[in-house]
Amino acid sequence: MSNGHDSHLPGLPGDDSHDAAHDGHGGALVPEEPIPNPGLPEHVWRPTDVDAKAERRAERQIATLFGLSTVCVVLFVVSYVVFGVNGGADGKSVRTIGGLGASNVALGVTLGGALLFIGVGLIQWARKLMADHEIVEMRHPARSSDEDREETVRVLALGADESGIARRPLVRNSLLGAVGVLIAPAVVLLKDLGPTNRDVTDSQPYPGAGLEHTVWDKGMRVVRDVVGTPIRPGDLEIGDLVNAEPAMIFEVDDEGEPVLEGVPLQIAKSKGAVVVVRMLPGENKPAPGRENWAVDGILCYSKICTHVGCPISLYEKKTHHLLCPCHQSTFDLADAAKVVFGPAARPLPQLPLMVDDDGYLVAQSDFKEPVGPSYWERDSQQSTSK
Amino acid sequence: MSIDTSRVAKTNTTAATAKKSNPVGGVAEWADDRLGLAALAKKNLRKVFPDHWSFMLGEIALWSFVVLLLSGVFLTLWFTPSMGETTYQGSYAQLRGVSMSEAFASALRLSFDVRGGLLMRQIHHWAAMLFVAAMMVHLLRVFFTGAHRKPRELNWVVGALLLILGTLEGFTGYSLPDDLLSGTGIRAADGFIKSQPVIGTYMSFLLFGGEFPGDVIIPRLYIVHVLLIPGLLLALITAHMILLVYHKHTQWPGPGRTEQNVVGFPMLPVYAAKAGGFFFCVFGVAAMMGGLLTINPIWKYGPYDPSKVTAGSQPDWYMGWPDGALRIMPNIESHFWHRTWSWNVFLPIIVLPMLLFTIVLLLPFIESWITGDKRDHHLLQRPRDAPGRTATMVALMTLYGVFWIAGGNDIIAIRLNLSINQITYFNRAAVFIAPVIAYLITKRWCISLQRKDRETLLHGYETGIIMRSPEGGYTERHLPLPTERAYRLTARNRDPDVLAELPGGPDANGVEPPRGIAGGLAGLRHRLRKMMYADNIQKPTTEELEEGHHHAEHEHELQAPMEGHPADGHQFDGHHLVEGEKLRADD
């Protein structure tokens, strides 16, 4: 460090050599008060430094640790060969240790042991046998010296001068503008990451495309979600809740191929899932305009939470409350699925029901409002009047 | 032409074979001839690092990152980041014949058909938990000890960026297997994205390649998880390390340790061995955890199905706090001009985390604005010696804790048989009240500890020796601290006398205070300075210390006749031997 830097040295604790007005700490301080720095304590020899026996013992300990590591590696390789991976393809029962898969436990413990023994051995070596004299190194200020700063400023100014960047604003500004506009290709290129809501809503590339639509339609049967069987009103007892899907999810065409596959199927499920509940007709308080949406006290609501879109599943029969397991929004199914608790802001959309000629539950139409979480373009005013 | 070729050849021969005493030396020489590494190495190989257990926390984060890289590379060899539909035919019988994504099928294959695959999956997941946890505890250590002060503010910023990137890396990682739990998490994330005004729907459709769930989100998250974020993490970790080496590590004040030096053990060999050994230890612990502790058993959740959900859905622990904020937010939504403002989602999950992250990022700058301290600081402070700062961080931790608890409100309600509604109402109030209480308690606690330090310096430590006076009164004998310990307690700066500063009138130098916004800011700064400094206990001055010692000596003299001779008391605390000492008057 050159002498020119000394004025930038940080102060000692209690050091008042710095300028009090500059650092914002008022008051004169006595250097090194109230107790002067006693200086580095004397080095204390360890047993392994002075006792040859202790030293050899430490050596043996460390070598043993490294040896144990190798033992673990051997056991690891043995475990790899001996233990088949959890659950053999032959259908044989899984070998377990303490309820966990034998292969995983054996591989994990032996690998962990192999690594830990090396680690502990190395640290032990450093602590017991390597020189333990503390070393003092001087710090340097993080900042450059004044000469370096001046030189840098001079060179920068020279560069600015030689390029004429200050004298030629036309060149400078047109360059800045041109580089700035280069953001446009980067943004434009990302447009095809996916179609927008308007794109899919207008072109309807698959049934029920767009945030305002689902695959539900007039006359589509309400079917049980796993098996796909249609539901008669008589199948449901009072207090029942059934997870259901639109029948289209299970439909096959003339050649036996599913109507919906892949992405359209996943999207149909993600928006079309519903719950069907039956309560005493008198218990339900239908919202205005929804008087004929129920069949014999059977109501159908979207299963997708209006908060952030988790499927809702926890039903309390007595209170008709439906609870979302993700963030605990609670909806009263007997009161137009209004929010009675939690962070959701809107009722669950209701699917108007009727019975078809064969006596099965079907939809009167699609949902009258978008299902799922809120989004910017969602126009709540058209909620039930669509 | 009379060139003496024999001499040229001889010189060349000598140069080419010079000092090749051993193969290692030869390789080193070959490399240095081309890279000139010796100049760099000579400065850094014996670089000094101070020793303290708390300096190890950042190291845990660093080594878990290396474990993540190693185990992650293994996982990529089998994992298929595809949402293509497939029918499972692997060895896990319960799911055979079930339709699922290739991503989930390959994650099952890793778990049940690749030996060590489940182990690596679990090591990877546990190491991720450790990585984020170690970064957070490291951040707390740095802040509580004042290691974020000048000149290290920018390294704090790098560290904060590492924390948020590590969190995102964790989220993208646990989303990849496309199981029911992680799929539900992605669906909720889609809801978060859609809640943003104006851009929300576009963002969602661009990210998912159309409507949720689409078939591109897993491959996109995969490339973010294995390339984009790890690349940024690596670059930032490198910057973090370079700055650490450039600034040299902070150290605790103590005998021989000053602001101008750094005292400790050299990089080679002690720290190379300790840090290298510690890498093996971290890896070993992660391997043990991977072998013995089940984490993320995706086969129990099953493949993602957008119409299903599991009860008690919980994200990984570090995503718990924004989830908690989301749970306790009142359900406010506005509708203006046929547009929806989803405050109930947008505020807690988008605005709040960004706001809190910004606050954390700016903490060193806010503090230096309040203190006005522009000096370099290389000596650490004990948390008690900066009560305002310590209390601020404890308040932030409390805020985090309340949100985190709120994120588990369903589990708490079930386990403790409480009403989820009441837990939620309680937490709504607690996020505002608890941090204030935590601030006040912590600050007072720190000041009490400072008072105790001052007391010990002035009157000595309690020896446990009870003296009985002729009148029958009992006193405990106090003895002065050993010099090294006393020095350690006094090796700190005095706080400025904020009560002498006048925010309203001209200051001590007669300079008029600023008006308008500048004046308001100056007033705010003065109030914050008072919060930070006004009640702190300062270390004793030299005079006070001397007076204390005189007082103690006087007391010892008074007590001396009781024993027949002045005992210094050190016979009983091991400071010197008792052989030949007259311990009782009748000896």
Image (spheres, coloured by chain):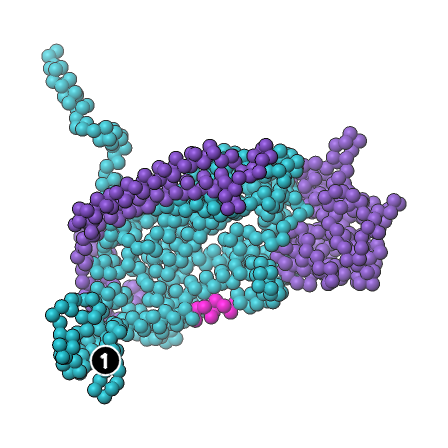
Chain colours: A purple, B cyan
Name the residue located 64 percent from the left edge and 36 percent from the top edge.
B96
> Which quadrant does the C terminus of chain B fall into?
bottom left
Q: Which residue is mark 1?
A: B467
Query: B271 left or right of A265?
Result: left
Say which element carries label 1.
Answer: strand
Name the residue located 17 percent from the left edge and 26 percent from the top edge.
B18
Name the kind of residue labelled 1 in the image.
Answer: Met
Name the residue located 13 percent from the left edge and 19 percent from the top edge.
B10
| Relative image position of residue B236 (x, y in whole percent) | 40, 45
The answer to whether B2 is drawn above or below residue B509 in the figure is above
Q: Which residues are magenta?
A: B432-440
Q: Which residue extends farthest bottom? A: B471
Name the residue located 22 percent from the left edge and 73 percent from the top edge.
B479
The answer to whether B464 is drawn above or below residue B236 in the figure is below
**Residue B339 seen:** no
| Relative image position of residue B107 (x, y in whole percent) | 55, 38
Front-lying residue, B135 or B461 = B461
Queried whether the magenta region covers residue B437, the answer comes back as: yes
| Relative image position of residue A310 (x, y in whole percent) | 64, 51
Label 1 CA crowd tier, 10 Å (few <14, some 14–19, many 20+): some
> Which quadrant does the N terminus of chain B fall into?
top left
Queried whether the magenta region covers residue B435, the answer comes back as: yes
Chain of the residue under label 1: B
